[in-house]
């Protein structure tokens, strides 16, 4: 095999220490030369590692993405060196014959021959933006959990408000909830004064769903704690949104571009950009991007038998965001019914879950194209922009046959037109 990196280094990173192995391959020698050294993960030792690499003219480094332990090392090396972060599945050593020293050597050996695929690591400003959007996702999930707990607490207390109101956390509903946990003397007339807008027409039904409720002092304390935590989460999410608005300013043009896609709004566009960045040259094609996001079927075949081809578990944050956007897009029937029509055609054959995944992949393909060319969203089928030439030619031939058949049935072409066309071509 051809040596891709004559001088390279493999690093096995742990929480407290790392082991680096430099491999030097000289043209006049068949056997490479190995140098190994151990460092701690403190900053001064990482800088010592950097100086050691520079002394040996080693500018290509590879290490596996072990948790977050690789991040401090990459931060101090990436300015002057080519740092490749590999998925552990590409550099995992043979079980039963591995230790820390052998692991660093094995990583260096694979990297030297160009057998290691580097993971997608965006620029530092995108990585910082990603930390904020992922933290926001976690806070939103926690807030949803608190809402469910609060609703369950009222159900246990014999309050069936959720069967009457469409939103338990609206303005009128909140006033009624605060009133129920603050008084022991229930007054139906006072409840009616707390209702606004369309809720006033549901006043009598709401009172019937509340009458006879019973809260113990312990239940009231629990409800108050849940309310306080939910209010804190609301303020935290609002503060995060304000910070994200400042951080996304350099990429406002990309955000506005993605907002032209049905189903994608500003917050979703920010989250998508924080995951994939705006430089699509990192991915060779839209198919590679979809595979990285976990929206492509896996390849699992042995002895001519195809096994499970389910989508992978990749894209833990990006895939749910795109699926959420896909659900919104298929409901958009007024202005842009493109995704809605695609969804209806697919789910009849493949089911609703597979159809939503297919729509999410279509949207990610459109995002790749838009960020690559700067074009606004313009619905088109995939084969027109991202399919092999032979398949495009087959699609054209199929369309010509269908058009010819239609014209013959309408009497606009003679019955023998298709046979004459085939003989002329032959």
Image (tube, rainbow, N blue to C red):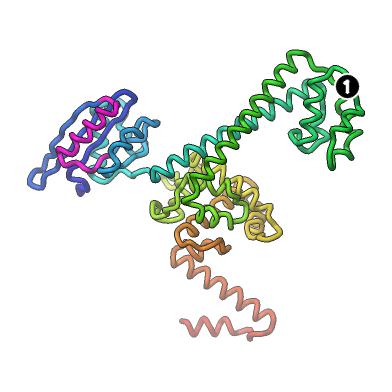
Q: Residue 297's spot in the image, x, y percent?
A: 50, 47
Residue that lies at the very extreme toward the left in this rendered image: 28
Tag 1 residue: 186
Q: Is residue 399 above or below residue 422?
A: above
Q: Is residue 52 above or below residue 307?
A: above
Q: Is residue 10 above or below residue 395?
A: above
Q: Residue 223's spot in the image, x, y percent?
A: 72, 21
Q: Is residue 309 visible?
A: no
Q: Is residue 306 left or right of residue 210?
A: left
Q: Is residue 395 above or below residue 196?
A: below
Q: Is residue 179 visible?
A: yes
Q: Nearer the viewer, residue 266 or 365?
A: 266
Q: Nearer the viewer, residue 195 or 49?
A: 195
Tell how many labels.
1
Q: Is residue 271 left or right of residue 1?
A: right
Q: Is residue 228 left or right of residue 283?
A: right
> How dense is the environment of label 1, judged by Cα within 10 Å: few (below 14), some, or many (20 and up)?
some
Instruction: Give the residues drawn in magenta, as a range.
Output: 40-61
Q: Residue 60's spot in the image, x, y percent?
A: 24, 43
Was residue 85 drawn as part of the magenta stretch in this picture?
Answer: no
Was residue 43 drawn as part of the magenta stretch in this picture?
Answer: yes
Give the SS element for disc 1.
loop
Question: Which residue lies at the image location 42% right of the left edge and 44% below the top edge?
Answer: 125
Question: Which residue lies at the image location 27% right of the left edge and 33% below the top edge?
Answer: 11
Which quadrant of the view contains residue 208?
top right
Question: Which residue lies at the image location 88% right of the left edge and 18% below the top edge?
Answer: 185
Q: Residue 246's spot in the image, x, y percent?
A: 51, 44
Q: Is residue 409 left or right of residue 105?
A: right
């Amino acid at each position: 095999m051809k040596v891709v990196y004559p001088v390279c280094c493999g690093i096995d990173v742990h929480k407290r220490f790392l082991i680096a192995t430099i491999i030097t391959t000289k043209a006049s020698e068949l056997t490479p030369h190995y140098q190994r050294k151990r460092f701690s993960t403190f900053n001064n030792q990482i800088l010592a590692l950097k100086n050691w690499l520079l002394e040996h003219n080693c500018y290509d480094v590879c290490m596996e993405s072990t948790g977050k332990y690789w991040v401090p090392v990459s931060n101090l090396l990436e300015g002057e060196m080519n740092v490749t972060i590999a998925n552990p599945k590409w550099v995992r050593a043979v079980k039963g014959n591995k230790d820390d020293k052998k692991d660093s050597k094995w990583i260096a050996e694979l990297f030297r021959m160009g057998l290691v695929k580097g993971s997608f690591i965006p620029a530092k400003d995108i990585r910082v933006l990603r930390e904020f959007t992922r933290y926001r996702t976690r806070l939103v999930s926690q807030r949803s959990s608190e809402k469910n707990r609060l609703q369950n607490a009222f159900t246990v207390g014999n309050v069936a408000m959720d069967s009457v109101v469409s939103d338990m956390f609206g303005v009128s509903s909140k006033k009624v909830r605060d009133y129920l946990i603050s008084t022991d003397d229930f007054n139906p007339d006072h409840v009616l004064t707390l209702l606004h807008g369309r809720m006033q027409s549901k006043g009598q039904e709401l009172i019937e769903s509340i009458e006879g409720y019973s809260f113990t002092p312990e239940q009231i304390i629990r409800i108050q704690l849940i309310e306080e935590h939910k209010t804190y989460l609301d303020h935290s999410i609002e503060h995060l949104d304000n910070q994200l608005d400042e951080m996304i300013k350099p990429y406002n043009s990309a955000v506005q571009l993605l907002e032209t896609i049905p189903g994608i709004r500003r917050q979703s566009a920010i989250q998508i950009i924080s995951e994939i960045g705006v430089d699509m040259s990192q991915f060779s094609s839209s198919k590679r991007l979809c595979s990285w996001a976990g929206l492509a079927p896996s390849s699992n075949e042995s002895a001519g038998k195809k096994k499970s081809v389910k989508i992978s578990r990749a894209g833990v944050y990006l895939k749910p965001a795109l699926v959420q956007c896909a659900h919104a897009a298929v409901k958009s029937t007024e202005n842009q019914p493109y995704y809605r029509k695609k969804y209806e055609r697919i789910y009849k054959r493949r089911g609703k879950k597979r159809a939503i995944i297919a729509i999410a992949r279509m949207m990610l393909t459109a995002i790749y194209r838009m960020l690559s060319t700067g074009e606004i969203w313009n619905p088109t089928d995939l084969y027109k922009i991202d399919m092999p030439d032979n398949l495009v030619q087959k699609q054209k031939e199929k369309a010509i046959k269908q058009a010819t058949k239609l014209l013959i049935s309408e009497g606009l072409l003679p019955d023998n037109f298709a046979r004459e066309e085939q003989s002329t071509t032959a």
